[in-house]
Image (cartoon, rainbow, N blue to C red):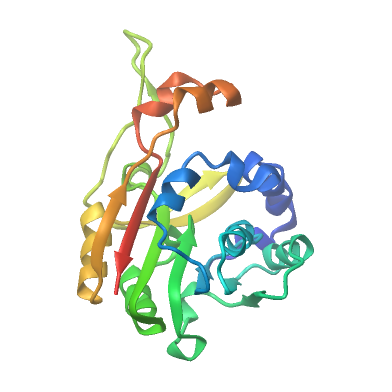
Amino acid sequence: MAQNIYDDPEFFAKYAGLPRSVEGLGAAYEWPVFRALLPDVTGKSVLDLGCGTGALARRLRELGAARVLGIDVSVRMLAEAQIRTADLAILYHRSTIEAIGADMGPFDLVVSSLALHYVADFASVCGAVAHLLVPGGAFVFSVEHPMFTAGAEQDWCVDSRTGRHYWPVENYADEGLRQTNWLGSPVHKYHRTVATYGNALIDAGFHIRRLEEPVPSQAFLDAKGAPAYERNRPLFLLISAAR
């Protein structure tokens, strides 16, 4: 069974209060990098895996996509997406990412923002996406960086001598389930290495166009009142691949 913590009322209320939930992509420092990885979406058909409240789906329509289908397992997420969306060319459907099939396509572009690290079998998803895409179609996604998902605690350490913050990377090669704590609740994620992400795409018939590991700018951190050491490790991995 796919994890569906977002339908827990208490967790969802906390999630809804996060800057990314309130401000949308404007609060996502990696969005300009993600945007640069996208092909021209004008007139294209797009599938959004793990669409959440639909921020990416709506932006893709603003960029010229002809239609967008967003899927998510969370009833609460999809309900909020419907409330925020007044566009008949955007459709939402309740489904797990693992359940996508060729009958949903074809699509010119498949995207996913910070959802695929919740999926246990990434290789199978790559295979399914390949069958959904038209020849030459693109797969662009972001996940939590493997440096971030490697350890279960997912938090900074402080050097007792210098007071400097550093990010511990442990058990990096030990792939699989990680149970972490986020917003006061246990959350299941799946750790895999950068090589595993890349090789799964290659094995599914994709060629990788670009990888990005963005860190927030100092100006972004200053605006958010965040500490400078947040630039000391990448939080996200972004990949653009083509069929």
Extreme-top residue of the structure: 161
- Left or right: 211 as drawn, with respect to 154: left
Along the horizontal axis of the image, is 4 left or right of 189? Answer: right
| Quarter of the rendering containing residue 226 | top right
In-image side of 41 versus 77 (left or right) = left
Q: Position of residue 220 (x, y in %)?
A: 52, 28
Observer-nearest of 83 and 6: 83
Q: In which image quadrant can residue 200 be found?
A: bottom left
Is the residue 212 above or below the residue 51 in the image? above
Nearest to the observer: residue 189 or residue 110 = 110
Q: Is residue 71 above or below residue 186?
A: below
Q: Do we see residue 73 in this rendering?
A: yes
In front of the other: 203 or 91? 91
> Which residue is depicted at the point 58% across and 77% down?
95
Residue 122 coordinates in the image, percent (x, y)? 35, 68
Relative vertical location of residue 100 with respect to residue 191 in this rendering, above or below? below
Number of numbered callouts drawn: 0
Q: Position of residue 159 (x, y in %)?
A: 34, 16
Mark yes or no: residue 2 visible: no
- Residue displayed at 57% across by 65% down: 64
The extreme bottom residue here reads 103
Q: Residue at x 79, y 63 (%)?
A: 83
Q: Is residue 56 above or below residue 131?
A: above
Give the residue drawn at x 52%, y 68%: 48
Image quadrant where one finds the C terminus: bottom left
Q: Position of residue 114 (x, y in %)?
A: 48, 55
Looking at the picture, tell me which residue is in the foreground, 75 or 130.
130
